[in-house]
Image (cartoon, helix red, strand yellow):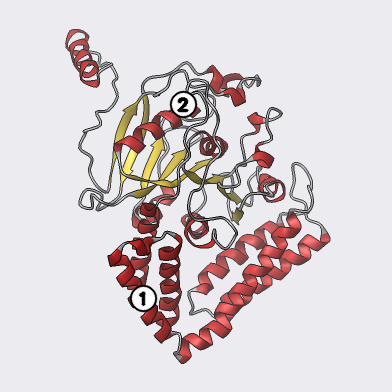
């Protein structure tokens, strides 16, 4: 149906009855930077199947039982500068709340600072089968409505919203990762499919849990059972709640660095990142996958430029310059002549400051100590993948505890020995998180 016809019908209905009939928000609606706009949208493919759920009697939450096709909503946040920079594309974060009507909460500062497009789902909540259609309708609308970089979409949510996010990333292409807050994966998949063990390895998996959360043990399900995925869990002092801004920022750092900096080192190419998605009878096979495109790398490079302007001292500047040059290579941004020229200047500056006594000393001490701490944490995580542990509780073997204690001590040493370096706050967050994990494990 033509959108103008629907809007006209809505107006006639309102004039005759005084009741407005809902209609999708026009695609040409003017949007304001650094502001939130409520968007109405419909399911694009009403016949799209959700066969992965078809054999599960999951009551009111089973999306197969959803009959709602029209009138979904999300609140759309556009970053500052969006309208002025018409050639820019941006990463996108989808947020779900167990009570619906999601918002940015403590995540707002980080998302606004780094210029993310944010989609806050309205109908997606616990106790309804409409949660998945709300995401699909919002996703298909927003990728047409605004400039989102392909392959740079992340989903997050609290509790039931976390479980929903684990599904979102598998039903639409270009989902780079998920941040599960206060819960693990959707258990409704089992026994049709074990989501932990069959999760697409291309999707990054992060999680946050308060030390008093009854779902705390689910963090171990991610760490132990997801042998093919890159996983990062963090703990904080709190209950069954959204993580504090500091924890969210740390998880986002890990997510972004895994995407733009370290994936190549891990053996994954930084070119096409195929995402395994659900096949649909309506679309006659799987939808096309999306690559992590150059526009996404350019966004991250812009972010690094801002960090470079704020950097104090040659050690911090050297780290950011290295990061920028890595982004240029991984994203093949040197095909742009202007960026290639800038990159050459960055190489010259980096080579120069690396010869300074300050950076040489920093490399031998603080930087090495932090790398050693990261290696110790990696060793602990490798131990975690060797056993199932205990269901419903946090269980560590003596070897795992020993490895974990070594990682905590290494991070503490960095924070205390090199308090004036950029590694100190990162080391403290890591040590505090791992320490909580140790204290809650049997």
Lower position in the chain sequence, tag 2 or tag 1: 2
**Image quarter of residue 145:** top left
Q: Label 2: which residue?
A: 133
Residue at 32 percent of width and 43 percent of height: 77
Disc 2 + disc 1, Cβ < 8 Å: no
Q: Position of residue 433 (x, y in %)?
A: 61, 60
Residue at 40 percent of width and 57 percent of height: 297
262 above or below 107?
Answer: below
> Which quarter of the rendering shows the C terminus?
bottom right
Residue at 52 percent of width and 31 percent of height: 286
* Mark drawn on residue 346: 1
The answer to whether residue 328 is left or right of residue 209 is left
Q: Marks 2/1: CA distance?
A: 46 Å
Q: Position of residue 193 (x, y in %)?
A: 68, 31
Quick one: 154 or 406, which is closer to the camera? 154
Q: Position of residue 296 (x, y in %)?
A: 39, 53
């Amino acid at each position: 149906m033509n959108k103008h016809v629907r809007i006209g019908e809505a107006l006639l209905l309102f004039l005759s009855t005084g009741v407005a009939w809902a209609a999708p928000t026009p695609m040409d609606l003017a949007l304001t930077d650094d502001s939130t706009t409520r968007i109405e949208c419909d399911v694009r493919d009403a016949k799209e199947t959700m066969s992965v759920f078809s054999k599960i009697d999951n009551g009111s939450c089973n999306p197969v039982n959803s009959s709602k096709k029209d009138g979904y909503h999300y609140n759309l946040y556009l970053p500052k500068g969006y309208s002025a920079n018409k050639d820019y594309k941006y990463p996108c974060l989808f947020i779900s709340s167990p009570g619906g009507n999601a918002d940015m909460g403590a995540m707002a500062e980080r998302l606004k600072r780094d210029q993310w497009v944010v989609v806050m789902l309205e109908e997606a909540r616990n106790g309804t089968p409409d949660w998945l259609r709300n995401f699909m309708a919002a996703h298909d609308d927003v990728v047409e409505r605004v400039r989102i970089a392909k392959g740079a979409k992340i989903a997050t949510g609290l509790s039931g919203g976390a479980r929903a996010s684990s599904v979102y990333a598998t039903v639409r292409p270009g989902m780079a990762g998920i941040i599960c807050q206060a819960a693990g994966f959707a258990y409704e998949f089992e026994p049709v499919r074990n989501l932990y063990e069959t999760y697409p390895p291309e999707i990054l998996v992060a999680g946050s849990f308060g030390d008093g959360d009854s779902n705390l043990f689910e963090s171990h399900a991610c760490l132990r059972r997801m042998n093919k995925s890159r996983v990062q869990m963090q703990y904080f002092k709190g209950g069954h709640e959204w993580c504090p801004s500091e924890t969210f920022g740390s998880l986002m750092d890990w997510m972004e660095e895994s995407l733009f900096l370290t994936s190549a080192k891990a053996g994954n190419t930084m070119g096409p990142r195929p995402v395994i998605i659900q096949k649909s009878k309506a679309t006659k096979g799987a939808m096309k996958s999306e690559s992590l495109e150059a526009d996404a790398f350019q966004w991250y490079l812009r972010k690094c430029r801002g960090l470079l302007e704020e950097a104090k001292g040659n050690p911090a500047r050297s780290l950011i310059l290295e990061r920028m040059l890595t982004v240029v290579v991984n994203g093949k941004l040197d095909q742009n002549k202007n960026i290639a020229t800038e990159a050459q200047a960055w190489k010259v500056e980096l080579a120069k400051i690396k010869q300074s006594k300050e950076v040489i000393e920093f490399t031998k001490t603080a930087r090495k100590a932090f790398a050693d701490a990261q290696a110790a944490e990696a060793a602990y995580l490798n131990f975690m993948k060797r056993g199932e542990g205990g269901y419903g509780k946090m269980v560590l073997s003596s070897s795992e505890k020993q490895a974990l204690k070594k990682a905590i001590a290494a991070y503490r040493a960095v924070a205390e020995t090199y308090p004036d370096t950029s590694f100190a706050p990162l080391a403290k967050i890591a040590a505090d998180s791992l320490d909580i994990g140790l204290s809650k494990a049997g």
